[in-house]
Amino acid sequence: MELTPEERRMLSGEDGPATKKAMEILLALGAIYGADRLLPVTSVQISGVSFDNLGEAGLEFLTEMAEGGGRVRVLTTLNPAGMDVENWQALGIDPDFARNQQRVIQAYARMGAATTCSCTPYLFGNLPRFGEHIAWAESSAVCYANAVLGARTNREGGPSALAAALTGRTPRYGLHLDENRRPGLTVRVEADLRGTRDFGALGVAVGRAVEARPGKPIPYLRGVAAAGVDELKSFCASLATYGGLAMFHMEGVTPESGLHAPPAETLTLTRRDLDEAIRSLDSAQGEADFVSLGCPHLSLDEVRRLAERLAGRRVRKTFWITTSRPVKRLADEMGYTAVIEAAGAVFAVDTCCVVAPIRGRFKVLVTDSAKACYYAAAKNGFATRFLPFEEVIEEALK
Amino acid sequence: MILTGRKISPGAASGEALTTTMGISFYGGVDPETGRVVEKGHELEGQSVAGRVLVFPTGKGSTVGSYTLYRLKKAGLAPSAIVNAEAEPITAVGCIIAGIPCVDHIPIEKLRSGMRLRVDGERGVVEVE
C-alpha cells in the first residue's frame, strides 16, 4: 500500500505505540481487502463500549491504547454502554459491572472520544455530509450514514474504528468506492407503511431475502411513498440486523437512488410479507414484564410523542426509555422528562436493552424495534411482542 | 523449505506447528483460560494452542474473537505465531493487538503438525527449520 509521509511516521512509532498499533491494524485490513492506499476520514463512531461485550480483555486493550498515547484525530463518538452512566443504580446494575464500565469510558475519554454513548450520533452533531469518508462501527448507524446521508463507511469493528480514530485514516476499499455502492436487487414494496414497527418489519423482510441470495446484493427499494428520520433509523437497524447490510437505496428518499437505474432482478413484497415478518417477532405467550422504547435511541420527537401519551397516566410494568444523553438533556429542558418519570417510566440513558447486562431478568419484552427483538431472543433469552410505538406505550400502562 | 506469503501482523517467532484443515473461531472455539480448542467436533478439539505456530486456512465467528487472542497472550497461552491460507479481519486484528506475528497466502497443505517453523511477520515468510 502506498503511504504518505505522515502515515509512514505514524507507522514508525514516532507518534507513540498506540498510533503505531492503529496503523498496523489498518494496513493489515488494507492488505486483506486489497486497498491501494488509506483515505482521510472526518468522523468516527466506535463500537465495543459495553463492558458486557468487551470483557476484561477488551478493557485491558483499551487501557493499553490510552496509556500508549493514543489520541483521536477526528470527531469520535461512542456506541451505547452497558448502563446509564449517571443513573446505573436505579437500573439495578451490579456495582462491579458499573466500575468496569466506568473504566472503559475513562479509557476512551483519555483518548479524546466524546463520551456520549449512543447508536444515533447523527442526531446530535456527529453528522457527516454527502460523499464524506468516515469510519463507523455501529451497524444501524453505518447503514443510516451510507444510505440516508450518502456518507461512505464500511462496517467497522471495534478495534478498526478505534484505529481510524487514532490515525484519522481508513483503508480504501468496499463502500468507499463507487462500484461497491451499486444496487443489485430491486425490491418493489406494495404496502402502505406507517411508523417505526412497519419500517422495522420491512427491514426484516428485505434483510432475510437479501441474506438468502448469493453475494448479498444491495437492495433498491421502490414504492415507499415517504419515510421520516425515525422510520429510517428503525429500518436501518432492522436491515443491518437481519440482512447484515450496510447500504440500500430507496427511490425518492435516499440521495444516491437517483444515480442508479433499478436493477432488473426484482423481488415484490406485499402487506402479507410484512405481516409475516411481524408475526415472526410478535410471538410471546404469557404476560409481558418488560417494555422498552429506544432501539435505536429515541429522537427528541419520539420522546415528545411518548410524553404526550403518558401525561397524567400510570405505568404498571418495568418501562425503559433509552436515548442519548444530549436528547435526554433537551427532554429535561422541554419538561418531557418530568412527565415521563411522573408516569413511572424509567430513563435508561447511554445504554439500551441490547447491550445492558439484563440476561434472565425478564421473560417477555414488548418493543417497536425488530433489532431489539432479535437480541432479546439471541442474547437475553426473552420472548418478544413486536407492536407499533403507541401500542407499546399502552402495553406498559396495562 | 522457505514459503513466501503476505505480511499480516509484524514480529517474528518460532515454534512447533499445530495444523488443521478447519477454520478456527477464537471466540467460543478456544478457551482463553486454558488455551485449549473447545469447539465440538473440531480436528484440534482438546489440544492447546499455547506456544505453537498455529496453522489453519482462515478464521471464522464473532469479531469479539480478536479480544480472545489478546486475552490468551496476556495469560501466556497464545500461539507463538499464526499462519493462514487467507487471513480475515478477526484473526488479523487479534494478532496485531496481541502482538502475535501472522503471515498468510501460504500453501498450508505443505505444513504438518510437529514441524519446527519460524514465522517472520515483517517479511511475510515461513521457514521450515
Image (spheres, rainbow, N blue to C red):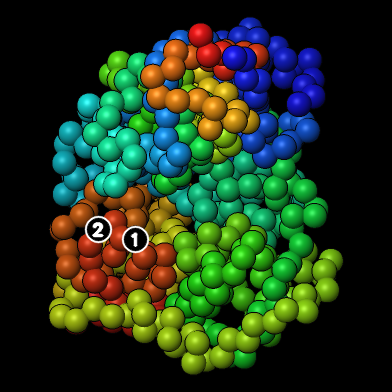
- Categorize mark 2 by other alpha carbons within 10 Å: few (<14), some (14-19), many (20+): many
In x, y percent, where is residue B30? 31, 35
**Residue at 50%, 87% in the rendered image:** A273
| Tag 1 residue | A375
Which of the marked residues, 1 or 2, is nearer the chain's N terminus?
1
- Categorize mark 1 by other alpha carbons within 10 Å: few (<14), some (14-19), many (20+): some
The quadrant where residue A49 appears: top left
In x, y percent, where is residue A384? 28, 73
The quadrant where residue A67 appears: top left
Q: CA distance from mark 1 to mark 2?
A: 7 Å
Residues behind callouts 1 and 2 on a single chain: yes
Q: Are marks 1 and 2 in contact (CB under 8 Å)?
A: yes
In x, y percent, where is residue A33? 67, 39
Residue A16 in sight: yes
Which of A35/A110 is in front? A35
Compared with A288, B115 (above or below) is above
| Left or right: where A143 falls relative to A310 | right
Q: Chain of mark 1?
A: A
| Left or right: where A359 falls relative to A116 | left
Picture disc at residue A158: none
| Left or right: where B113 falls relative to A32 | left
Give the amino acid at mark 2: Asn
Q: Quadrant of the N terminus of chain A?
A: top right
Say what secondary structure mark 2 lies in: loop
Which of A80/A339 is in front? A80
Compared with A352, A49 (above or below) is above
The quadrant where residue B66 appears: top left
Q: Chain of mark 2?
A: A
Residue B70 in sight: no
Give the amino acid at mark 1: Tyr
| Tag 2 residue | A380
